[in-house]
Image: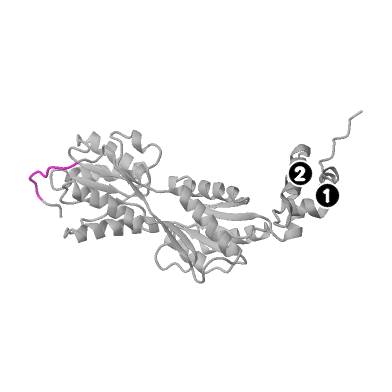
Amino acid sequence: MVSAQPRPPTMADVAGRAGVSHQTVSRVLGDHPNVRDETRAKVLRVVEEMGYRRNPSARALATRRTRTLGAVASDTTLYGPASTLFALEEAARARGYLVSTVSLRKLTVQTLSEALDHLSEGGVEGVVAIAPQRSAVDALSRLRHPFPVVTVGGGPGVDTPCVTVDNHKGAMLATGHLLAAGHRQVWHLAGPEDWQESADRAAGWRAALEAAGIEPPLVVHGDWSPLSGYRAGQELAGWVGRGLTAVFVANDQMALGLLRALREAGVRTPQDVAVVGFDDIPESEFFAPPLTTVRQDFTTVGKRSIALLLDLIEGRAPAGAPRISIEPQFVVRASTFPHTPQSGGAPD
């Protein structure tokens, strides 16, 4: 004979043991202010003793709140998008929300429309879209949705609420550091052209050089991968001795490939060529040599994005399209040090 499984405790069971009404238990669980402290403590103690868990479907019907948020992302194998998504989920849980995530190969009008429809059917109250490409931000701006949407990584002129790291300032810090160390020129290995982060970092690099009265050299592009950094490094190694003494790389993974290519070409870092990256991935301090880089605070990005989305959901956000910019932090390690200029021709 198979014994029946004990049924889970109900709110009525909690109310009976605590000696209060069903409505009082509901108020305590809903954090209603009009409950005496001693009553609240007693109810919560009984909830803990009985192992009561409130039915989320019933709660949603009663409050018209699902306490579920949506997240849309692509390229989650990359450090930046993956770290952002993790930070969003962590920040949402801290505020008592779950996150339903849709990962897409490419962010287009069609794929984003399908993703938002899917999340809407799931009852999400709002969505954070990790949209690092300018085409993705443009696609989002052309869609209509029944809930607030916050973008992470949108560029200038974005007409949706946005949270972003100040990539322009981070690039200026990196380039300024190399110029202050005595380098007469700083080359740049940029990311993909469609990525707003890549464009902002290239713009900050260019602005720092122009402010110092230096004509920027041609930009070399990679695709964020170590392999693309390695190939760019093979190309740039040919300029060593002809004016190339410093490179600002748009992310740490490309910097890893660049460092290997320079090392294989007999170029020392930082004695011959100083290198600065961007991101401060966990492995950066273990590169050979440890990498000077720009740190992004993904935890703060996640917290501010979720806070802004909840403000929009609950009607507390300012009018228009709020834009929140997160300050980056510059981290100095052994891949750079003060440079003594040597004689040599200037690059084209």
Identify residue type, mark 1: Val
User: Where residue 18 sits: x, y (%)?
Assistant: 82, 44
| 341 inside magenta stretch | yes
Q: Residue 148 location in percent, x, y? A: 58, 64
- Checking the image for residue 20, the label placed there is 1
Question: Which residue appears at 32% of the width and 40% of the height?
Answer: 257
Q: Which residues are magenta?
A: 338-345
Q: Which residue is outermost to the top?
A: 1
Magenta residue check for 80:
no
Which residue type does callout 2 highlight? Answer: Lys
Q: Are marks 2 and 1 in contact (CB under 8 Å)?
A: yes
Left or right: 162 as drawn, with respect to 120: left
Tell me the residue that label 2 is attached to.
Answer: 42
Secondary structure at numbered mark 1: loop
Residue 220, can we see it?
Answer: no
Which class describes the residues within 10 Å of circle 2: few (<14), some (14-19), or many (20+)? Answer: some
Residue drawn where x is 15% and y is 55% of the image = 348
Horizontal side of 67 relative to 83 (left or right) equals right
In the image as oriented, which residue stretches furthest toward the bottom?
A: 319
Quarter of the rendering containing residue 117: bottom right
Q: Looking at the image, which is closer to me, 319 or 267?
A: 319
* Residue 310 in the figure: left or right of residue 336: right
* Above or below: residue 125 compared with residue 257: below
Magenta: predominant secondary structure element? Answer: loop
